[in-house]
Image: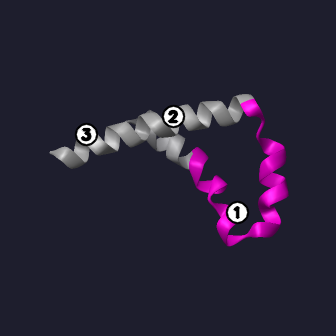
Amino acid sequence: MSKEQIEFLNVLMPLNIEGRYPSDKELIRKQLNEIRMKEILDKTIELNKWIKVLIKY
């Protein structure tokens, strides 16, 4: 896993907090805008593709 991929996973981790701590949902929402969410989605799709390639081997 590249350093960039690890750093991106560190960005994703706090976004998973909503399911565990719904009261933090508003705080997380305030930190994200449409552009940032698009970046996160694009990188998530790319990481997903990378993982699928690894699984095939």
Residue 19's image quarter? Answer: bottom right
Type of amino acid under label 3:
Val
Q: Which residue is mark 2?
A: 43
Q: Quadrant of the C terminus?
A: top left
The answer to whether 44 appears left or right of 51 in the picture is right
Type of amino acid under label 1:
Glu
Q: Is residue 5 depicted above or below 14 in this figure? A: above
Q: Which residue is mark 1?
A: 18
Residue 20's image quarter? Answer: bottom right
Type of amino acid under label 2:
Lys
The answer to whether 19 appears left or right of 52 in the picture is right
SS state under label 3: helix
Residue 16 in sight here: yes
Query: Bounds of the magenta span?
Result: 11-34
Q: Is residue 13 magenta?
A: yes
Q: Earlier in the sequence, mark 3 or mark 1?
A: 1
SS state under label 2: helix
Q: Is residue 16 magenta?
A: yes
Image coordinates for residue 14, horizontal then vertical, percent = 65, 55
Image coordinates for residue 32, horizontal then vertical, percent = 76, 40
Q: Which residue is mark 3?
A: 53
Q: From mark 3 to mark 1, how far is it between C-alphas? A: 29 Å
What residue do we see at 84% from left, 46% from top?
30
How is this picture coloured?
one colour
Q: Earlier in the sequence, mark 1 or mark 2?
A: 1
Residue 1 in sight here: no
SS state under label 1: helix
The answer to whether 41 appears left or right of 32 in the picture is left
Q: How many marks?
A: 3
